Amino acid sequence: MTFVIAFIAMTALDALLGYLKGNNLNDIIGEIKPLAYFPMLLFFAVAIRSISDVTMVARILVGCGIIMSVAYLLVLLAAFTGVVSYLAVFNALGSIDEFIFRQAVDRQLVFIGFFYKGFFYVAIAMLFMIFGRFAYGRLVATICGIALAMTLTRSLFVGFACAALVGLLLQWNWRRSIVPIGQLGVMAIIMLIAVQAETNLNLKEFAALGVIRGPADLEKYASQGGVPPPVPPPTAAIFEARPTDNERIRDVKFVFQNTNAASLLVGNGLGAQIRDRDRVELNYLEVLFKQGLVGLGFWLLLIGYVTQLYFASAPGSRDLAAPFLLSGIFVYVATAFNTVLTGSIGMGAVFISIASLDVISRCRPAAGVVPN
């Protein structure tokens, strides 16, 4: 309840600050909408009240992660073998905001992998299977790891790798560490090969067709004083506009150039624009610019509380508690590269961890008894 009250007060003040600074009212309301998920923390606190509830939640998370992984790999296999065309997959999923494609073209769409926002929970499921108590968990986690690597999403891999390394340190046993370290190695190799294949495919096809991939190509043509070539059908609607690393650097420069002592402390309010954009992928940078150190400190306080609850749990409950702590760490690391924490996907994972760890920390199993 304390977190929810503090959040409501902070959000109200940030919205008022944004309004007083002249930020667009529609932009302010638009930013409040995803943040309105925060009171769901109360729901999770009420819904998860016992160890049986905690284990049920863990099973649901693992089951959903396995289903998404298998479905994703089957779609990729079907497209690769020609059972369905790449273009058919894109037409079915590309118009949905939750799916993001990286693509090349050769009269029809070709891709190595694509990203679905729910795949964050595949990484969370892997953490439960590797560090929790699930039959054949590590074997199934390998399949999920392959699916995760084929998304070609660096933030997922880096977030999972950091969380897994923390898990290995918390439960250090060199024999138990061999498999997770091997899985990380396999994922890294698959991702490197897939990214290189995608890069080669894109360079070959776009060089041949002269297709505009996104803002970087537009800047290149503009700097050369040339006219960008038209995008041939059926790729006219396929325009890669995801921020590049260079754009992230420009975002960082903009924030530091437009920050003073007052805005560093309390931010510029909700609705503030970063280079004429409402949202940027560097989530912590965005929070700092809009909510200041006060807002950033609030969000970091949540992972601090998750960590405190983990260490407050009985030693015999740590195997059950560890995946929930690692899930929170994964979300916070991934948030450094994507807008995760301040949306329902990231908040949901953190809230589940808080509610579950609160139950586990209050459970004191008898000597020699480990919660299942």
Image (tube, rainbow, N blue to C red):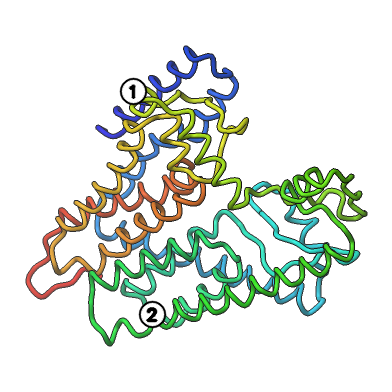
For disc 2, the marked residue is 181
Task: Describe residue 159's horizontal placement relative to residue 48 as left or right.
Answer: right
Q: In this view, does 285 lie above or below 143?
A: above
The residue sitting at the bottom extreme is 175
Q: What mark, if any, has residue 59 been given in the picture?
A: none
Spatial CA distance of label 2 from label 1 is 43 Å
The residue sitting at the top extreme is 20
The residue at 92%/54% (across/down) is: 232
The residue at 25%/59% (across/down) is: 51
Task: Please state the horizontal and vertical placement of residue 58, each as a whole percent of the image.
Answer: 37, 63
The residue sitting at the front extreme is 224
Q: Which of marks 2 and 1 is nearer the N terminus?
A: 1
Quadrant of image for the C terminus:
bottom left
Q: How crowded is mark 2: few (under 14 residues within 10 Å), some or many (20 or more)?
A: some
Residue type at mark 1? Ala
Task: Please state the horizontal and vertical placement of residue 264, each as a whole percent of the image.
Answer: 37, 29
Secondary structure at numbered mark 2: helix
Q: How many numbered marks have been drawn onto this rendered protein structure?
A: 2
Task: Please state the horizontal and vertical placement of residue 153, each as a whole percent of the image.
Answer: 57, 62
Quadrant of image for the N terminus:
top left
For disc 1, the marked residue is 9
Task: Describe residue 129's horizontal placement relative to residue 101 as left or right.
Answer: left
